[in-house]
Amino acid sequence: MTRPLILLTNDDGIHSPGLMAAIEAVHDLADLVVVAPKDQQSAMGRSLPGGISGAIFVEELRLNGDRLPAYSVPGSPAQAVLYGLHEVCRQQRPDLVLSGINYGENLGTSVMVSGTVGAALQAADMGVPALAISLETDPAYHARFGYDVDWRTAVHFTRWLAGLALSQPFPPDVDVLKMDIPAAATPQTPWRLTRQSRLPYYETIPSDRLRFEDEVRLPYQIKIDRARLESDSDIYALRWITSCR
């Protein structure tokens, strides 16, 4: 019997500790192939930028001393999935695409910016069910690696959800499952099925520059409108493990 195949990707880049945590979570559930952006691609959504070379690079990734089939693409997370499904996995179609584990939670309408979610949406658009997994972290780690992050609980729930996704088909109206793991969660934390909030979770802050020609990257912050927050939403349930379809 042919073992299932999982394509792993992310938006933090091929060398992200979160990607290695995802590999650790599912390595014995299926055969794996990794196709991820060559470098940091957070907040790219499902974009397919023009001007990339289209090259696919072989990468050196190992788990327990064993080399993994791993490739990087100098493009967005969605492009990594596009090249992964069309080129790298031409001989065997993956049974599941797993995007993550992301540095930072992806909640509410802010998921439209997420490269982690964008990669999963690209997979679903190409007919492959997908998971988008994120771990709540310090915002300082959203664009750079934090090596003091504890991935153990995220590994536990990623393995659980991936195993469930491989063992039974998604419901007819589900193409992507998004899971967000609170920073303080443990393997005993109960999970909760939610819906995506219609409110934003991240808010962009205006700059204080004096001239338009000054180069500025607009910062952002977490801002929750608690008066309007839906009690069945992913933002509300952040103190639980949230699974949102």
Image: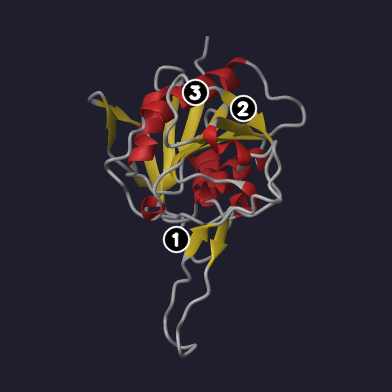
Viewer-closest of 8 and 16? 16
The kind of residue on which mark 1 rests is: Ser
Looking at the image, residue 72 lies above or below residue 219: above
Q: CA distance from mark 1 to mark 2?
A: 42 Å
Q: Are marks 2 and 3 in contact (CB under 8 Å)?
A: no
Q: Which mark is residue 9?
A: none
Crowdedness of circle 1 by 10 Å Cα count: few (<14), some, many (20+)? few
Q: Which residue does the numbered mark 1 point to in the structure image?
A: 53
Q: Residue at x 70, y 36 (%)?
A: 232
| Amino acid type of the residue that numbered disc 2 sits on in the rendered structure | Arg
Find the distance from the CA under tag 3 to the CA under tag 1: 44 Å
Residue hosting label 3: 189
SS type, badge 3: loop
167 vs 114: above or below: above
Under mark 3, the amino acid is Thr
The residue shown at (41%, 49%) is 12
